[in-house]
Amino acid sequence: MTTTTFKVVSTPRVQEQRGARLGAQLFVSAWNAVASLFASAPRALTRAQEAAEVREMARHLQATDPGFASDLLAAADRHESAAK
């Protein structure tokens, strides 16, 4: 008969350093504050500008998916003419 001995080495539990959570919260708050200073405000587009962006997307898709590109062009035309 064979006997197998298995020794388990216990590892000490890692303690969270004092102030780690507070330090992380302060860092994230500061990071978000600085990031908000450099964030650009969303610009309001006119219907013509929105339609122009969709037409540009349709031009890029024309070679790979002409059916979808024509649908996008038609949707852009409808979107732009609905404002008038």
Image (cartoon, helix red, strand yellow):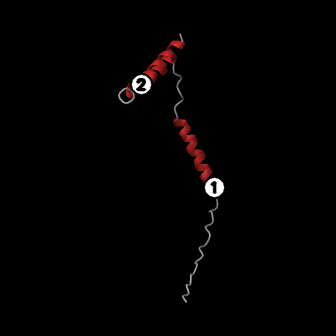
Q: Position of residue 58 (x, y in %)?
A: 41, 25
In primary-sequence order, the first of circles 1 and 2 is: 1
Q: Residue furthest bottom?
A: 1
Which is more toward the observer, 72 or 18? 72
Q: Residue furthest left?
A: 63
Looking at the figure, which quarter contains the N terminus? Answer: bottom right
Between disc 1 and disc 2, the foreground one is 2
Q: Position of residue 84 (x, y in %)?
A: 53, 10
Label number found at residue 21: 1
Mark 2 is surrounded, within 10 Å at the Cα level, by few (under 14), some (14 to 19) or many (20 or more) other residues, namely: few
Label number found at residue 67: 2
Q: Amino acid at mark 1?
A: Arg
Q: Eyeballing the image, is 33 above or below 56?
A: below
Q: Secondary structure at mark 2?
A: helix
Q: Eyeballing the image, is 21 above or below 11?
A: above
Mark 1 is surrounded, within 10 Å at the Cα level, by few (under 14), some (14 to 19) or many (20 or more) other residues, namely: few
Instruction: Report whether 32 appears left or right of 64.
Output: right
Residue in the picture at 51% in, 36% down: 38
Query: Which image quadrant for residue 61?
Result: top left
Residue in the picture at 46% in, 18% down: 74
Which is more toward the observer, 13 or 9? 9
Q: Position of residue 41 (x, y in %)?
A: 54, 29
Residue in the picture at 51% in, 12% down: 81
Q: Residue furthest front?
A: 1
Q: Secondary structure at mark 1?
A: helix
Q: Position of residue 14 (x, y in %)?
A: 61, 67
